[in-house]
Amino acid sequence: MKKDIRKKLIELARLKTPWSYSQLNDQLQLGLNFQNGYDRDLIGEWLGEISRHEFEKGRPLLSSLVIHQGRDREQGDGFYKLCEELLGTPWEQLKEDKNFEIEKMKECYAFWKEGENYRKYKNDW
C-alpha cells in the first residue's frame, strides 16, 4: 500500500501537481472513510512513514503534496507535526509560515523532475 502511495506521489511531483487526501484515496482505491478517525489516522501514518523514509535518505518530503481539498488547500496538521519531529521547529510556527508548505512542495517538484533522481530512487522503498 505505502509503496503504491509513494509511487503515485513521485508521479505527482514530476507533474508538479498536489492532490487532496480524497483524490489519493479514490484514485488508489485505498477504501478509506475520512469520516472515521481511524482511517484519517491511518493515511497520516502511511504518509508519515513515506516522508520519514525520504527524509532519512536526504530527499524531500513527498507527503507535502497531499493537501486538504477545502478552501485552504494546505497540508494537514500531521504534516506539520512530522516536520517538527524531523526539523525541530514548532509545528504551529511552520503552519503559520505559508511559504514553508510551498517550499516543501517545490523541493519535491525539483528533485523528482530530475531524470537521474527519478531513475535512481523511484524504486527505493
Image: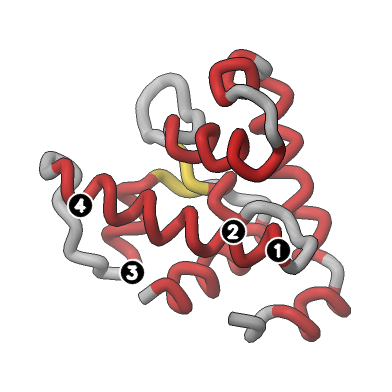
Q: Residues within 10 Å of mark 2 (few under 14, many from 20)?
A: many
Q: State the image coordinates of residue 44 (x, y, percent, origin top left).
A: 37, 49
Q: Residues within 10 Å of mark 1 (few under 14, many from 20)?
A: few
Q: Which residue is mark 1?
A: 56
The mark tally for this picture is: 4
In the image, what residue occupies the spot 61% across and 39% down?
A: 83
Element type at mark 3:
loop
Q: Is residue 53 or residue 7 the one in the foreground?
A: 53
Q: Residues within 10 Å of mark 3 (few under 14, many from 20)?
A: few
Q: Nearer the viewer, mark 2 or mark 4?
A: 2
* Mark closest to the chain's N terminus, 3 or 1: 3
- Asked if marks 1 and 2 touch (Cβ < 8 Å), the reply is yes
* Mark closest to the chain's N terminus, 4 or 1: 4
Q: Nearer the viewer, mark 3 or mark 2?
A: 2
Q: CA distance from mark 1 to mark 2?
A: 6 Å
Q: Amino acid at mark 2?
A: Arg
- Residue 69 in the figure: left or right of residue 120: left
Q: Amino acid at mark 3?
A: Leu
- Residue 40 in the figure: left or right of residue 51: left
Element type at mark 2:
helix
* Mark closest to the chain's N terminus, 3 or 4: 3
Where is 119 relative to 89, above or below? Answer: below
Q: State the image coordinates of residue 121 (x, y, percent, origin top left).
A: 73, 79
Where is 31 relative to 20, above or below? Answer: below
Q: Which residue is mark 3?
A: 28
Q: Which residue is mark 4?
A: 39
Q: Which residue is mark 2?
A: 52
